[in-house]
Image (cartoon, helix red, strand yellow):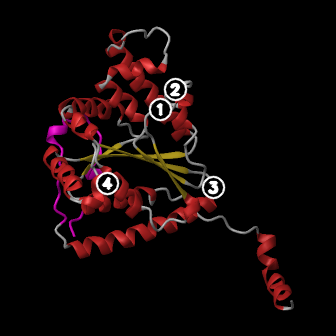
Amino acid sequence: MKNLKPEDFRISQPIKIKNLQTNLHLEASKNEIEKELASISKKLGDLQNTLYAHGKYGVLVCFQGMDTAGKDSLIREVFKEFNVRGVVCHSFKTPTAIELRHNYLWRHYVALPERGKYSVFNRTHYENVLVTRVHKEYILNENIPGIEHVEDVDEAFWDKRYQQINDFEKTITDNGTIIFKFFLNLSKEEQKSRLLRRLDKKSKNWKFSPGDLKERKLWDSYMQNYEKAINKTSKNYAPWYNIPADDKLTARYLVAKTLLEVMQTYTDIQEPELAENLKLQIPSYIEQLNKE
């Protein structure tokens, strides 16, 4: 198995998406990767139990990627060893009427993890600087003062929004939320193959929407805006990781490995010990129970 570290994928300086990997060979068989992924997933689940007992941190895991990037199956495989109480997945679709009556970050604030738990964002607050940059007319639905026409949505507007997102993430990290942001970097060629599989395989037809093809025609615009968003918002306290996503199994392994190795650096996350007076009473508690 190729020796890789989270730093190999962490974005710590301005990038060009065209220069980032979409495919990576792990120098291991499928069986070896699956076995290692299962082991890491189990360790992550155990670590979450400790996180819950410790009760001071929450973990926010964000996934962004183009359609067919494999977000759903990745979440299923990486987090399947978690206690169900310890992880909640949120899939952010088109904002509802109620959500549009609040600022664009409101629905993400209310979905943040409790201390001791993970929140997984399947698509994230970054949709507000990705989809809305490609389709500026969507911003008008937010009824923002001073934004009456598409022409009002200028570069200064987006710079302010990037800063608002940075401030949002800094605030929650300062208060105990550990943030991971994964860009599932899929090539345009692989997306075509996956869309064709959805059409060819009857059991996958339900996943296909004609809108997928309309969005695919805007690929270059999406890549340009992913690049801008990543470069503006990859911070030490909330870094982006580029995850080559042309092979689903490899992407799952890289995400799981990154989560585990970074979480293991938080050495203060420990199960609390019983108070000394309670420890001294353990033999008597055992005796009480055995006498029942």
In the rendered structure, which disc, 1 or 3, sits on the residue that comes first in sequence? 3
User: In screen coordinates, is 127 left or right of 108?
Assistant: left
Residue drawn at 28 percent across, 53 percent down = 205
- Give the residue pinned by disc 2: 100
Residue ID at (21%, 38%): 213
- The residue at the point 29 percent across, 61 percent down is 203
Dot 1 or dot 4: first in sequence order is 4
Q: Amino acid at mark 2?
A: Leu
Q: Which residue is mark 1?
A: 95
Residue 103 coordinates in the image, percent (x, y): 53, 25
Give the mark toward the camera: 1 or 3: 1
Mark with earlier residue (2, 3): 3
Q: Amino acid at mark 3?
A: Gly
Give amino acid for label 4. Answer: Pro
Q: Who comes first in sequence, dot 1 or dot 2?
A: 1
Q: CA distance from mark 4 to mark 3?
A: 25 Å
Question: Label 2 to label 4, Cα distance in Å?
Answer: 36 Å
Secondary structure at numbered mark 1: loop
Secondary structure type for disc 3: loop
Q: Is residue 270 visible?
A: yes
What segment is highlighted magenta in the picture? 1-26
Q: Nearer the viewer, residue 6 or 20?
A: 20
Q: Nearer the viewer, mark 2 or mark 3?
A: 2
Disc with the residue nearer the chain's start (2 vs 4): 4
Q: Which residue is disc 4 drawn over?
A: 6
- Where is 4 relative to 143, above or below? below
Residue receiving disc 3: 55
Q: CA distance from mark 1 to mark 4?
A: 33 Å
Where residue 38 appears, as percent x and y from the top left, is 37, 72
Task: Estimate the x, y position of residue 261 in percent, counting from the top left.
Answer: 39, 60
